[in-house]
């Protein structure tokens, strides 16, 4: 489900614990098949288990009964992020929700953690733990943040209120202890705002954000944010992100914004510079599961409270001291202003002046509908008149991943490329390596093979968004009609990690055009209403030992995709649904755990 901030519209969208690949940093501390977000500390989304065939739905469990309320208040869309099913041998842990959905506050809902076990072939609930976790904000601020536990050290760690987490006995769901980075204080404006991650030694990491007020999230500057580390013996350390990002602008500094709609088509002039306003505190972004490299380096993402364009990739030493930080916006170029501003940035896939310098662009030619103003420089972002940089949205669940060579990938947003975003690639020392023109709300997977690796991502070519603005007269919403070279299409794509613009190894496009619904009697009713297909709604695909990719689509199907980009199988779940994105996981026995419309499905032979 794409997110159109420019027009103010939302278009909706195991490894058995002895993993042998030590280059992924997986050690015997993990006995679970899928213990955390994107499987492992590096968030590779890959396992050494062969996934089962998608022949049957083995379990169907409703974990979010509020979905009809959420759809009714959001034009039929489901704007929530969910936990990946955590698999631990014969046991499965999954969130659930109760309460009532209210667009004005997320706190009208309640979150729970559930343990299920396979008993005589039936996935059976064993216990439910009632958390007191609340997310910040409301639907008016961003999509519903993710509530996400982790398995480590023989316990389940679960988010709690006030920036705390619970350490839970897996046998009976009882609380062993509440782990509070702030002593005994539980502040109502302090929030645990990330999935919990665990490294190979059993240290648990998470992010905390403190606000002045939770009313009008962006109406006030943030107070502070922290990276928290909890050791297996419950020792707690924390560090403020203000310490970890020394190169970020100060909260009272001025940041460059974008041109106004009255100046369309953009850029207003070849040397135009957009206005500035107060940046706000550089704080942790929402939904960022810390990634941990085999050497213990921790990676996270920050952003300015008032500016999505000023984000940073942050590297932290194991003792929580700063290692390095690098701007996602890209550095300014050498020289005097305004040339230093105009020639700064990373991406060269913006305005299309018809020259070879525009080869990465998907925009129509300058002067054409959806194109930049005539005279715009090749490759620049029309909204800022400089080369593009990654933007960090709190709607996103993108999180850093660490490749076998130690380099880091992060899926950032970008508003001038039909809202597709950019997959950014950095070295282990923070140098920018390259990018690919999709990245938004996606944690790609890593597939290791033949002494190298590939990166697997969704690659949605959205329509109904406009190319770089939300004004139909300048950026027509029908992408296919105005930009036949890059029409509306939806792919799962495998990439080489080479420098520069990453190259496509293979790509898969589903040919399904039918929206289907599973009726109460189990039958399926369909209508063909998506002639250009459905976008992929997976935000963390799962990859098995053979390189087979498992991913959800908004058509309601779970797909398995062979290496080479051919379809292996698909199976319909519950509902074709414009949805915020959902992850997949693989159990130690090869069963596939997937999600659709507030249901957890288990699929296998």
Image: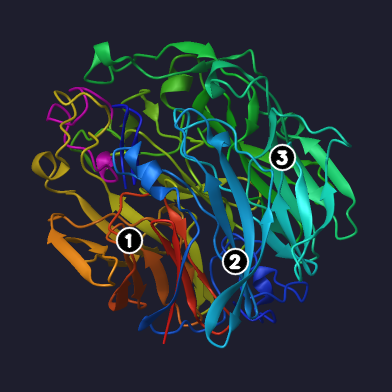
Please report the residue visible at 24 percent of the width from the left and 36 percent of the height from the top: 465
Crowd around label 2: few <14 · some 14–19 · many ≥20 (10 Å): many
Q: Quadrant of the rendered structure where residue 418 is?
A: top left
Q: Position of residue 420 (x, y in %)?
A: 34, 44
Residue 126 appears left or right of 532: right
Farthest residue, direction left: 481
Asked whether 139 or 207 is in front, the reply is 139
Which of the numbered marks, if any, corresponds to residue 305?
Answer: none
For the residues marked 2 and 1, what is the alpha-carbon distance in whole angstroms?
Answer: 20 Å
On the image, numbered disc 3 is attached to which residue? 161
Q: Is residue 225 above or below residue 217?
A: below
For the residues marked 2 and 3, what is the alpha-carbon distance in whole angstroms?
Answer: 25 Å
Please report the residue visible at 40 percent of the width from the left and 34 percent of the height from the top: 388
**Residue 93 painted magenta:** no
Residue 126 appears left or right of 379: right
Task: Tell me the colour scheme of the image.
Answer: rainbow
Which of the numbered marks, if any, corresponds to residue 39?
Answer: 2
N-term mark: 3 or 1? 3
Residue 446 appears left or right of 456: right
Q: Quadrant of the rendered structure where residue 558 is?
A: bottom left
Is most of the magenta stretch helix, strand or loop?
Answer: loop
Crowd around label 3: few <14 · some 14–19 · many ≥20 (10 Å): many
Secondary structure type for disc 3: loop
Q: Position of residue 513 (x, y in %)?
A: 16, 61
On the image, numbered disc 1 is attached to which residue? 553
Mark 3 or mark 1, whichever is nearer to me: 3
Boundaries of the magenta span: 357-377
Mark 2 or mark 3, whichever is nearer to me: 3
């Amino acid at each position: 489900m794409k997110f159109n901030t420019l027009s103010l519209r939302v278009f909706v969208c195991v490894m058995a614990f002895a993993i042998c690949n030590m280059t992924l940093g997986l050690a015997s501390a993990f006995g679970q098949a899928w213990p955390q977000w994107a499987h492992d500390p590096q968030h590779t989304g890959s396992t050494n288990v062969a996934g089962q065939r998608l022949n049957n739905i083995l379990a169907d469990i409703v974990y979010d009964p509020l979905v009809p309320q959420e759809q009714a208040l959001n034009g039929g869309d489901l704007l929530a992020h969910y936990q990946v099913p955590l698999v631990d041998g014969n046991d499965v842990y999954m969130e659930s929700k109760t309460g009532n959905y209210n667009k004005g506050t997320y706190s009208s809902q309640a979150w729970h953690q559930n343990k299920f076990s396979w008993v005589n072939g039936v996935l059976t609930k064993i216990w439910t733990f009632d958390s007191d976790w609340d997310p910040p904000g409301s639907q008016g601020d961003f999509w519903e943040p993710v509530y996400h536990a982790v398995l480590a050290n023989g316990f389940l760690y679960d988010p709690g209120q006030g920036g705390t987490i619970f350490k839970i006995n897996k046998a009976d769901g009882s609380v062993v202890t509440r782990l509070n980075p702030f002593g005994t204080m539980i502040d109502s404006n302090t929030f645990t705002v990330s999935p919990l991650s665990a490294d190979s030694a059993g240290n648990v990491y998470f992010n905390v954000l403190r606000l002045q007020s939770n009313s009008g999230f962006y109406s006030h500057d943030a107070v502070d944010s922290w990276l928290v580390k909890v050791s297996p013996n419950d020792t707690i350390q924390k560090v403020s992100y203000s310490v970890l990002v020394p190169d970020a602008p100060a909260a009272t500094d001025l940041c460059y914004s974008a041109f106004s709609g009255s100046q369309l088509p953009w850029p207003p002039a070849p040397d135009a510079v957009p206005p500035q306003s107060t940046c706000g505190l550089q704080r942790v972004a929402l939904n960022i599961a810390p990634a941990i490299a085999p050497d213990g380096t921790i990676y996270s993402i920050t952003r300015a409270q008032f500016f999505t364009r000023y984000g940073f990739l942050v590297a932290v030493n194991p003792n929580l001291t700063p290692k390095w930080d690098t701007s996602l916006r890209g550095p300014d170029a050498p020289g005097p202003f305004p040339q230093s501003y105009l020639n700064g940035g990373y991406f060269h896939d913006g305005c299309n002046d018809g020259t070879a310098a525009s080869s990465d662009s998907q925009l129509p030619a300058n002067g054409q509908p959806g194109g930049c103003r005539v005279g715009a420089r090749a490759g620049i972002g029309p909204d800022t008149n400089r080369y593009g940089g990654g933007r960090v949205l709190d709607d996103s669940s993108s999180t850093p991943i660490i490749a076998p060579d130690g380099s880091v990938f992060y899926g950032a947003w970008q508003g001038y490329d039909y809202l597709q975003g950019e997959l950014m690639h950095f070295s282990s020392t923070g140098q920018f390596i390259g990018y690919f023109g999709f990245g938004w709300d996606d944690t790609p997977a890593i597939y290791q093979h033949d002494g190298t690796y590939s990166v697997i991502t969704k690659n949605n070519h959205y329509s109904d968004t406009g190319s770089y603005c939300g004004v139909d007269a300048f950026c027509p919403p029908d992408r296919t009609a105005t930009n036949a070279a890059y029409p509306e299409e939806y792919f799962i794509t495998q990439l080489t990690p080479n420098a520069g613009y990453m190259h496509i190894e293979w790509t898969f496009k589903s040919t399904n055009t039918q929206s289907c619904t599973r009726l109460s009697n189990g039958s399926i009713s369909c209508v063909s209403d998506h002639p250009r297909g459905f976008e992929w709604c997976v935000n963390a695909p799962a990859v098995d030992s053979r390189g087979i990719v498992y991913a959800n689509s908004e058509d309601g199907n779970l797909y398995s995709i062979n290496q080479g980009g051919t379809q292996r199988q698909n199976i319909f779940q519950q509902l074709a649904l414009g949805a915020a994105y959902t992850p997949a996981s693989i159990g130690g026995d090869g069963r596939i755990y997937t999600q659709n419309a507030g249901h957890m499905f288990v699929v296998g032979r």
